[in-house]
Image: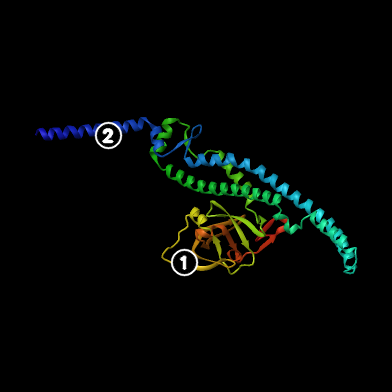
Amino acid sequence: MSFLRLLSSICALVALALVANAASAADNPQKILARQELVPIVPNVWGTSDELKLQEIASELPKLKEPLLVLQRDLQQRMEANSLVWGQQGITIKAMESSLAKLSPSDPGRQPLLVQIAQARSQTIEPEKLAGQFAVQQRLIELIEVRNAISIAILESDRLLAAMMARYADLEKDEAVTAALRAIDKGARLGPARSLENHRRRLAEYEKLVFTTSVPVYLQSGRLRVSAIAGDRLPVTFTFQNNSAGESTMITSSVAESLDVVIDRKVAPLKVEVAPKRVAMVRETTISYLRLGRFTTSGVRVLVLPPECEDLGCTLARGTLSGHSVKVDLPQFRMVIDGE
């Protein structure tokens, strides 16, 4: 009997402890909200950490807009100035070349004229080659970096918004959360904050700046370079192979690792000529998503280069954009996809 009395006493104590804990939780509405990882967003509004991240993005985006516009204006001015000089010099060069054509090979006037033509050519750059001039190239790279930062911020905002709204929909059904909010303040409510709608409108404005039909390109050692957002989060610079419709897009092993792509090691690697007179064993996989401005494509087949081919960088084959019109406009520093 003494054992039964002891057991009964223990059960009573446990019951009292449970009641005390329940009362404590009821008396501590903030603990209930904390368990749901809810934090104050603005006065009387409790929200998720995703909404705090959205607020951070909203505060950072305006800091990127001005550099973007400055770089665009600077490049436009450089382009127009060079075009003007090139046009003027072109007339002069053609006139001198016409005079040169009238001279016999032994005419002593040929050499001075050849020197003048060479000097005239050195004073300007062909519009098709301006994107490879160092100062212009660096400004284009800066422009691409700013565009990428804005693009990633927009894509991250989209992900956070979707996750946040789904979370709020679930929390609205939680009676304990509703009661805890009322206990804190009669005016307290669940997020989102009213400022969220303003952020959504601003996102649409930023999309118009970077999700465009044209994307910047530049020349590097004679190669056409273009940037894309891979997997919704990683900027990748590619060498664009405009005449390689039948070839494959290739990425380096470091890019593949950053994207966490799945490579089936059970499938034998392929022996491929990855560069002139250079053969390597590559593995085939897919990138979930690739974005160039407004253009997007999913399930992109790629070949992953081995670590010893890291120096080759990534290559975007024309075939990856098959079914879409692509125009490379070097004098305008751009590639146009499905537009204009």
Residue 266, by quadrant, is bottom left
Pointer 2: what residue?
A: 18
| Residue shown at the point (45%, 31%) measured from the top left | 186
Q: In the image shown, does 274 or 160 lie closer to the viewer?
A: 274
Q: Is residue 207 depicted above or below 271 in this figure?
A: above
| Residue shown at the point (71%, 51%) measured from the top left | 136
| Residue shown at the point (67%, 49%) measured from the top left | 138
SS of the residue at dot 2? helix
Q: Among all residues in the image, which is located at the extreme left?
A: 1
Disc number for residue 7: none
Quadrant (top left, top right, bottom left, bottom right) of the C terminus = bottom right
The coloring applied to the image is rainbow
The x and y percentages for residue 127 are 75, 57
Residue 8, by quadrant, is top left
The x and y percentages for residue 32 are 38, 36
Query: Depth-wise, is mark 1 or mark 2 nearer the camera?
Result: 1
Pointer 1: what residue?
A: 269
Give the alpha-carbon distance from disc 1 to disc 2, as whole Å.
61 Å
**Which amino acid type is shown beneath numbered disc 2?**
Leu
The x and y percentages for residue 85 are 82, 53
**Which amino acid type is shown beneath numbered disc 1?**
Pro
